[in-house]
Amino acid sequence: MATEFLKSQLAVLVVACLAYTVNAQGIGVNWGREASHPLPPPKVVELLKANNIAKVKLFDADPLVLESLSGSNIHVIVGIPNFMLRRLNSSFKAAESWVHENLTRFVSDGASRVLIDYIAVGDEPFLQSYGEQFYPFAVGAAANIQAALLEAHISEKVKVVVPCSSDAFLSESGLPSEGQIRPDVNKTMIELLSFLSRNRSPFVLTISPFQSYLESKNLSLDFALFRDSARQQNDTHRSYKNSFDLSYNTVTVALSNAGFPRVEIIVGRIGWPTDGAANATSSLAEEFLKGLFRHLHSRSMSSPNPLPLPSEVYISSLLDEDMRSTATGNFERHWGVFTFDGQAKYQVDFNHGSRKLVNAQDVQYLSSKWCVINNNEDLSNASALALDACSAADCTEISSGGSCFNLSWPGNISYAFNSYYQQHDQNEQSCNFSGLGLITTVDPSVDTCRFYVGIKTSFSITVHRSALSCWMIPPMVTILSCLLSKRW
Ligand SMILES: *[C@@H]1O[C@H](CO)[C@@H](O)[C@H](O)[C@H]1NC(C)=O
Ligand SMILES: *[C@@H]1O[C@H](CO)[C@@H](O)[C@H](O)[C@H]1NC(C)=O
Ligand SMILES: *[C@@H]1O[C@H](CO)[C@@H](O)[C@H](O)[C@H]1NC(C)=O
Ligand SMILES: *[C@@H]1O[C@H](CO)[C@@H](O)[C@H](O)[C@H]1NC(C)=O
Ligand SMILES: *[C@@H]1O[C@H](CO)[C@@H](O)[C@H](O)[C@H]1NC(C)=O
Ligand SMILES: *[C@@H]1O[C@H](CO)[C@@H](O)[C@H](O)[C@H]1NC(C)=O
Ligand SMILES: *[C@@H]1O[C@H](CO)[C@@H](O)[C@H](O)[C@H]1NC(C)=O
Ligand SMILES: *[C@@H]1O[C@H](CO)[C@@H](O)[C@H](O)[C@H]1NC(C)=O
Ligand SMILES: *[C@@H]1O[C@H](CO)[C@@H](O)[C@H](O)[C@H]1NC(C)=O
Ligand SMILES: CC(=O)N[C@H]1CO[C@H](CO)[C@@H](O)[C@@H]1O
């Protein structure tokens, strides 16, 4: 009797594993902090909680951030920036001190405990544009961190992962059946896969439907946005109705062909930007995320031949970041579901309910003051001054496709002046512009174009771009196993 019962329960478990769907517990966000005026970490943690976001992926191990997360019940992926990989590869001591200084005290039990599930060693080190700057050190660094975790007796709690960009994979035909590892990183990628498999760690992958849409003439917006009207792409044994499945399966085929057919996959970064490029809008971002969530929740049950689903998915991103590199596009600063100051840009359902997103509360702004151009002056040098301002401040909104692109001259010059002025905490000197700047208390915002007011924060920083480019994007998380992740 008992055995029968056990058997039937097992059968249920097995079916549940096969039909595993990503539930609300499996959806998290990337919390990047490349912002001139970041929201204070405790405020961000309130924002996560208010929206029932149960997982977060960080790009470093800032103690203020970890302290804010302590006792929160939010699961965390801590990141190690790419620039540290070289040292962590060559020195076990460096890995030991990283674990000692940044991890141990937060992992131990007690009220201040942070639920750290993974350490993301590097941030997409295989990104093709990085060349050989980072990836050759990734596996060695990961192995040293793993050994340091073992030594600190926390390797059971915390797993080591290495987030990978989707451009580490390719397909000659554009179809998944020909998916393979990019030849120049093939050897290292296989070393990484062996490392992950030895430690039962998941593979963390970025999927970029927005960039695929920009780059490939063959993929339509309908295909990227999970629309029913999308023209399907026909592969040998299956057809694809959306860009997500196409990219995802290109990678699963490549991993399988490399000898790792059953590796667990986490999508460490996926999203849709809202500004700085054509089709980067809030309404399309909303459509994309709704389509993605619908797809993740329903796919395994309905499709006759389901793809293995990712066990966790991290949305890019929680907040906009005005200091991110724009090397790959002006949209890079506009991934947030929320604006830099924590206001929801659109509605999307993170937790299977139907509540609206909750904005950050009691945000402390600077005064209601803006810097604009003084039209009564000789404006012949204005454009040059604006360009200067833009080399430091964020002017992605006035670029082609941006939300303020339609501002006619000299409105766009005012935008640049204001951006610089807010970035400099409304310091009077920063609205001079050789006498062309004018401080006003009348909000110059028009239609979709918002002239923002900065956040008052002791965290505001003036960081040099070169330093920032080192710790650009994200890391990720995982699932132990289907069994553990399901609550029975
Ligand atoms: C990584 O560190 C090991 C051990 O110090 C060293 O042998 C190896 O050359 C390093 N890898 C690279 C790519 O420098
Ligand atoms: C701990 O992490 C911080 C932030 O990522 C980093 O600056 C620091 O160097 C790390 N400590 C060690 C000992 O590596
Ligand atoms: C684009 O689609 C056409 C027709 O379906 C196909 O012949 C071509 O190989 C595709 N190109 C790429 C880059 O996928
Ligand atoms: C990658 O390396 C594996 C193992 O060395 C080899 O079998 C495979 O052919 C390589 N693939 C590519 C695309 O170079
Ligand atoms: C794939 O097949 C379907 C149905 O056979 C067809 O309607 C569609 O145009 C094909 N897609 C491509 C890209 O050839
Ligand atoms: C514009 O800039 C040039 C070069 O710095 C300067 O010589 C000129 O006086 C400026 N013109 C005005 C109207 O400020
Ligand atoms: C900018 O103007 C064009 C043409 O008037 C219009 O089609 C477009 O929607 C406007 N863009 C924004 C962001 O307002
Ligand atoms: C402002 O707009 C004008 C055209 O209206 C354009 O020529 C100029 O480059 C823009 N300036 C900036 C800083 O975007
Ligand atoms: C603004 O700049 C002009 C010329 O560079 C300078 O003469 C003036 O003193 C400055 N004004 C303030 C308030 O700093
Ligand atoms: C749906 C939508 O907004 N599509 C637009 C994407 O961007 C291109 C280029 O600007 C437009 O032509 C499309 O209309």
Image (tube, rainbow, N blue to C red):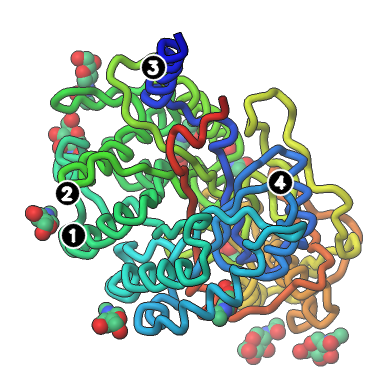
Label 2 sits on residue: 258
Q: Which mark is residue 48?
A: 4
Q: Can you tell me whether the CB of the residue at mark 4 lies under 8 Å from the nearest atom of ligand 2?
A: no
Crowd class of label 4 (few under 14; some 14 to 19; many from 20; radius 10 Å): many
- Alpha carbon distance from label 2 to label 4: 38 Å
- The first of marks 1 and 2 along the sequence is 1
The disc labelled 1 sits on which kind of residue?
A: Asn
Residue position for label 3: 11
Q: Amino acid at mark 2?
A: Ala
Instruction: Write down the quadrant of residue 378 in the picture.
Output: bottom right
Query: Marks 1 and 2: which is nearer the front?
Result: 2
**The residue positioned farthest toward the top in the image shown:** 1
Q: Quadrant of residue 107?
A: bottom right
Asked if the beta carbon under badge 1 is closer than 8 A to the nearest atom of ligand 4, the reply is yes
Is residue 149 something that shows in the picture?
yes
Residue at 67% across, 74% down: 382
Q: Amino acid at mark 3?
A: Ala
Query: What's the residue at 21%, 39% (across, down)?
Result: 253
